[in-house]
Amino acid sequence: MYELTRERDASEPVVGEMLEALWRDPRRAILDEGIVCLVCGRIFRHPTNTHLAHHGLTSERYKQSFGYNDGRSLMGRAVG
């Protein structure tokens, strides 16, 4: 099982098998201090509408695509 740790450089995107593991269980993409964008693997405090638009997505479409509840905020647990 792959774990994202605080030691990880937040500017370094999550890629490969680790990103694939997050696709299988998107709940794990929500970290204490941020959230992993499941499209590009970059880590954000919260992915902005501008960032999601670069992927051709709205916040609502992103949530639907990855199985998040409509009421779920897209931000880290400590941020919210």
Image (tube, grey):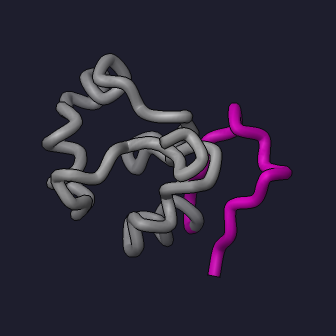
Q: Determine the residue positioned at 58% across, 64% down.
A: 18
On screen, residue 19 above or below 42: below
Tell me where residue 9 sits by quadrant.
top right
Q: In this view, which residue lies farthest toward the right? A: 7
Task: Tell me if residue 48 is in the magenta stretch.
Answer: no
Residue plotted at (37% across, 43% down)? 74
From this viewpoint, which residue is outermost toward the top? 50
Q: Quadrant of residue 50?
A: top left
Instruction: Please provide the residue range marked out in magenta.
Output: 1-17
Percent coordinates x, y for residue 40 in the rendering = 45, 40
Residue at the (42%, 66%) spot, across then down: 27
Task: Tell me the chief SS of the magenta region.
Answer: loop
Q: In the image, 22: left or right of 11?
A: left
Rendered residue at 45%/42% (across/down):
75
Q: Is residue 62 left or right of residue 29?
A: left
x and y, in percent, of residue 30 in the image: 49, 56
> In the figure, is residue 24 to the left or right of 55?
right
> Magenta stretch containing residue 13, yes or no?
yes
The location of residue 79, given as percent across then percent down, is: 55, 39
| In the image, residue 39 above or below residue 52 | below
Q: Residue furthest bottom?
A: 1
Q: Is residue 69 left or right of residue 12?
A: left
Which quadrant of the rendered structure holds the N terminus?
A: bottom right
Residue 76 locus on image (x, y percent): 53, 47
The number of numbered discs placed on residues in the rendered structure image is 0
